[in-house]
């Protein structure tokens, strides 16, 4: 823009050309702002979906953890069950 204004000052470009250049610059800036806003809206939507999924999975995990902690496992036959499938949990049945 400064280049066009310098050309106007020297008389190489008329005022109409300066106005046309300003309009084109404003339209380009407007399109850029619209793109940025659209990007932020899409990113925000994706973030909300991800946070919702995380919250839902945390609720499921808490529910299943509660079920597990409140469960009692009994052996049908006497013996020792060494590994029960969850990390460090072991079930020991008396003989």
Image: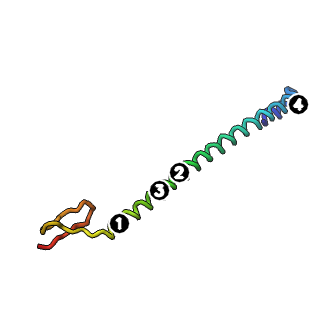
- The residue that label 2 is drawn on is 49
**Cα distance in 3D space between marks 3 and 1:** 20 Å
Q: Determine whether the residue tagged by mark 3 lies in a helix, strand or loop.
A: helix
User: Contact (CB < 8 A) between labels 3 and 1?
Assistant: no
Q: Which mark is residue 67?
A: 1
User: Contact (CB < 8 A) between labels 3 and 2?
Assistant: no
Q: Determine whether the residue tagged by mark 2 lies in a helix, strand or loop.
A: helix
Q: Nearer the viewer, residue 67 or 49?
A: 67
Q: Quadrant of residue 57?
A: bottom left
Q: Which mark is residue 54?
A: 3
Task: Please tell me which of labels 3 and 1 falls first in the chain.
Answer: 3
Q: Determine whether the residue tagged by mark 4 lies in a helix, strand or loop.
A: helix
Nearest to the eye among marks 3 and 4: give it. Answer: 3
**Cα distance in 3D space between marks 2 and 4:** 51 Å
Q: Which mark is residue 15?
A: 4
User: Contact (CB < 8 A) between labels 2 and 4?
Assistant: no
Task: Identify the residue at image location x=44%, y=61%.
Answer: 59
Q: Nearer the viewer, residue 89 or 68?
A: 68
Task: Identify the residue at image location x=33%, y=69%.
Answer: 69
Q: Quadrant of the N terminus?
A: top right
């Amino acid at each position: 823009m400064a280049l066009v204004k310098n050309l106007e000052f020297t008389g190489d470009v008329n005022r109409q050309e300066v106005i046309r250049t300003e309009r084109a610059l404003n339209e380009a800036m407007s399109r850029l702002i619209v793109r940025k806003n659209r990007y932020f809206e899409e990113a925000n939507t994706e973030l909300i979906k991800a946070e919702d999924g995380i919250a839902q999975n945390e609720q499921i995990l808490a529910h299943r953890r509660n079920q597990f902690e409140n469960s009692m496992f009994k052996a049908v036959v006497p013996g020792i069950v060494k590994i029960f499938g969850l990390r460090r949990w072991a079930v020991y049945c008396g003989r």
